[in-house]
Amino acid sequence: MSKHKPRVFSGVQPTGNLHLGNYLGAIVRFVDLQEDHDCIYCVVDMHAITVWQDPKELMKSTREVTAAFLAAGIDAEKHIVFNQSRVSQHAELAWVLNCTARIGWLNRMTQFKEKAGKNREKASVGLYDYPVLMAADILAYHAERVPVGEDQKQHLELTRDIAQKFNNDYAERIAELGLGRTEDGGFFPLPEPLIQGPATRVMSLRDGTKKMSKSDPSDYSRINLSDDADAIAKKIRKAKTDPEPLPETVEGLEGRPEAANLVGIYAAMAGVSKEDVLKDFGGKGFAEFKPALAELVVEKLAPINAEMKRLLDDVGYIDSVLKNGAERARAIAEPIHADVKKIVGFLD
Ligand code: TYM
């Protein structure tokens, strides 16, 4: 008999260039989890439009993220790859969960504060509501595990709070309908965040205290999955460092954010621990470490880059993957959402 495999859900926004943070913090983990999980990986186009997106660029980016998933080694036949807007249960469940989530909870979301900045009054309502749609993404499939980078931790805590409040608010009704699925009779399982590995927070190459991000105006702050070998080598050569040689131990990286970041990137890229990297490079200067790092990053990203280009030449294929994935995603989300409607008391 085949054992139940835990269900994994995660998403990536199609908002321009994917970078090394997205790759190491999320996509590499997505690939690893395929072995012993049932995975659903989503290109979250509805999240993307919480800030302005040119429609044609959005279509292009949606296909690019899909190509990156496939090129990195996600198996879209064994698992599910699709774009969010194709499965209407995400939006429908988000509405119900909007009525569960509290304004006070959303007011605490640091990502909204960062993204909205000083111009809060002009931010879209969607940007404010972003984390509730994210909760809907996960809960629509009763997903149990969610691999993400460190920056999504607070959103996942909110998802758990929303799931718990829904389970409590409707506890009697869930029991009456016999729809309890968790040990304590709840309808939604509380999803577990998976924030693992040496690169859960890849930092900017220009400032080791700032997260590597798509929105940084300096392209030298990040390595894009679309960068060629020359660009990668140049960006690593120019990366900010300090004058000391690398330490022998991980503790020695404390207070040295740029060194810690580069060692973390090396470890994640090589699939080893930071300790292992320092065994080889402790005591050596950046003049020696940087070329080795550049070589490693180029060696790992070049085949992905080439495969992405090959896939993007065949838009028809990419689109068929997304369409097929959406059909399979819908088949899971539909019955769960039908139960949500019963629980809430919507006549159907
Ligand atoms: P997004 O598109 O901003 O980022 C995609 C994934 O990349 C991770 N990430 C990083 N990891 C390490 N270092 C970095 N510098 C770095 N920058 C980004 C993010 O943590 C994320 O895992 N809200 C999500 C998308 C989403 C989602 C979901 C995720 C929508 N619905 C449901 C999980 C489950 C986001 O904005 O990711």
Image: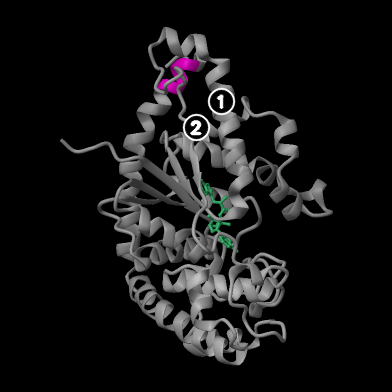
Q: Position of residue 253 (x, y in %)?
A: 65, 71
Q: Residue at x 67, y 47 (%)?
A: 127
Q: Position of residue 98 (x, y in %)?
A: 62, 30
Residue situated in front as seen by the camera: 187 or 348: 187
- The residue indicated by pointer 1 is 164
Count neighbours of disc 1 (C-alpha within 10 A) and say few if under 14, some if 14 to 19, many if 20 or more.
some
Q: Is residue 309 above or below residue 70?
A: below
Q: CA distance from mark 1 to mark 2?
A: 7 Å
Question: What's the amino acid at mark 2?
Answer: Leu
Instruction: Decide if ligand 1 comes within 8 Å of the CB at mark 1.
Output: no
Residue situated in front as seen by the camera: 96 or 211: 211
Q: Quadrant of the image for the C terminus?
A: top left
Q: Position of residue 34 (x, y in %)?
A: 32, 53
Question: What's the amino acid at mark 1?
Answer: Gln
Q: Which mark is residue 133?
A: none
Residues drawn in magenta: 339-343
Residue at disc 1, secondary structure: helix
Q: Position of residue 327 (x, y in %)?
A: 32, 43
Give the main secondary structure of the magenta stretch. Answer: helix
Name the residue at the left extreme.
Answer: 1
Q: State yes or no: discs 1 and 2 in contact (Cβ < 8 Å).
A: yes
- The residue indicated by pointer 2 is 190
Q: Residue at x 57, y 36 (%)?
A: 159
Residue situated in front as seen by the camera: 262 or 156: 262
